[in-house]
Amino acid sequence: MQVEGLIAPPSRLNDFWRAFAQNRGAVLGLVLVVFLVGLALGADVIAPHSPIEQFRDFELAPPFWDHGGSLRFPLGTDAVGRDILSRLVHGTRLSLLIGAISVAISLTLGCILGLLAGYFRGIVDTAIMRLMDVMLALPSLLLAIAVVAILGPGLINAMYAIAIVLLPHYVRLARASVMAEAGREYVTSSRIAGASALRLMFATILPNCTAPLIVQATLGFSNAILDAAALGFLGLGAQPPTPEWGAMLASALEFIQRAPWVVTSPGLAILVTVLAFNLTGDGLRDALDPKLRRA
Amino acid sequence: MLRFVLRRLALIVPTFFGVTLLAFALIHLIPGDPVENISGERGMDPARRARLLHQFGLDEPLPVQYARYIGHVLRGDLGQSLTTHDSVAREFATLFPATVELAFFALLFALVVGLPAGVLAAVKRNTVADYAVMGVSLTGYSMPIFWWALLLILFFSVQLGITPVSGRIAVQFDVPSVTGFMLIDTLLAGDLDAFRSALSHLVLPTIALGTIPLAVVSRMTRSAMLEVLREDFVRAARAKGLPRWRVIVVHALRNALIPVVTVVGLQIGLLLSGAILTETIFSWPGVGNWLIHGVQSRDYPVVQGGILLIAGIVIAVNLVVDMLYGVVNPRIRHA
């Protein structure tokens, strides 16, 4: 029976939200993320033009606040007369998709490998972790370039490359969490109750390791978007006319003197998106687990 | 200490072989084989193809090929570039000083600006100064440096016209390469104008490459300082009546430096990643630029050798940092 005036203990979600909302930067980041997701989902409706339609009479039109600009192309047009705002909006969809897919691949594989390594230890552990050490020995962009060199340039291959680059972080996290949890009493009791290895790993242990993985996944989003843009910029990721931000920057290079707006806006879009995920990730980390520290 | 060093060295060996395996696999995983890549579009008659396969040893079983590859690597032979027909190892050695010079100044920039900024943010915690430093640091950390480099060029080179856009030195200077480090070579040649030109070419790439390490350093310094400032020995130093700056710089900062130095050492991979982009934008003749050209022109020996060498360097530097950390902090050594 509920006693009048007695306050119910805060639910876990409430508790989390209170901790998260204390960090103004994190809230700002989350608002930005929601906004970007909205842009990505509604790109077809929001973008004033098609991202690949070429208005040949309006090549390198300046943005509306500049002399000679018009509201028809609010952020101006690029060298072949494509509306930059529309390309940026569609680019949001691409970038978030790249982030989501590469993080999803990486997180899934990383959890499986990390669980296997942490649960079975011994030779399995050694084999997996030595492989991860090799991958960590390579600078992230270099590893991505190596993978793209093997698979060939392109948006899809860039996603695979980024998923591979991100992988060691999830494996290490999952392994460390599993090793910390495996000796706990609830795991032992579950084992005595006859749970199989698979059930122990995925149903008993994994749900208790989610906090660091969620944080790493959010921060992984920003790494993925940044690396994808870098690959696109180097001509190894998305290929023209795909409205990917990095590729947009690369094709704008020769017009940097005549039309600086073709260079400034795609970069700003990358910066804001990466910043949004970093802010959110930092906030999540503080709210979910104050013990976690970013290196 | 010796045991610690030996254990770390033992851990390196499998990692190094793993990297060679990766580099070896690279050639065999690419679509088509190297012979096909040489022949290009024109195709090649089967007899010549078989002869070339035999000449490159590509008709032997993979383990044999790998063993021979390791043999070559250990003798420092990384093959020849398909485009210049020069030894990959020699090309790397010629270009590497340019990358080191750039990375060194980027790191120096990060430390010279980042350490004081981090200390300031920690001492003035929760003030405007703190928020400003942290805001700039977070922005720097999220910065796509290829775009940042373009903005720097746009502002300093195009608008103000005070810095050169690309390269290591103006074309009219011809400085004999002694050390490979342009600043040192120009001084050795006694050519001050050339030195000034080389220095002005370094400014923008240094800022571009140094920005992310700067963000990391100032963030780390702040959090390490905040921790140390709470310690009893800092309170004791203050209670003794020492001047405030002395407590901060001598007592607190010196102890806060340990984690910062470690993080800086581990930035070397990040720095080389950034160097690839920075060098591409500023046409800086270093290994990053060379590697990207290798990838774009499908010069696989260059890609293979470059990846192997860069990974080797990162492993070696991480090892040295690890050991230095062990020297500074005995707790790690016995863990």
Image (spheres, rainbow, N blue to C red):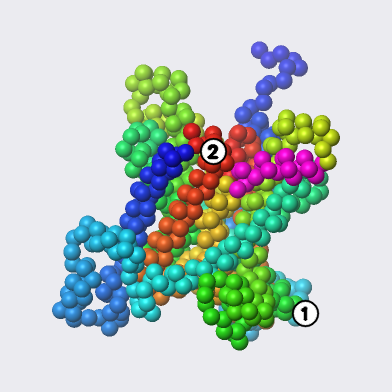
Q: Residue furthest bottom?
A: B172
Q: Is residue B307 above or below residue B174?
A: above
Q: Is residue B231 above or below residue B225?
A: above
Q: Which residue is mark 2?
A: A212
User: At 59% from the left edge and 37% from the top edge, which residue is drawn?
Assistant: A292
Report the number of discs.
2
Q: Which residue is mark 1?
A: A67
Quick check: B58 left or right of A253?
left
Q: Amino acid at mark 1?
A: His
- The reply to whether the magenta stretch includes residue A111 is no
Q: Quadrant of residue A49?
A: bottom right
Secondary-structure class at tag 2: helix
- Residue A190 appears at what percent x and percent y? 40, 21
How far apart are the alpha carbons under marks 1 and 2? 50 Å
Q: Is residue A85 in view from this perspective?
A: no
Q: Amino acid at mark 2?
A: Pro
The chain ID associated with circle 1 is A
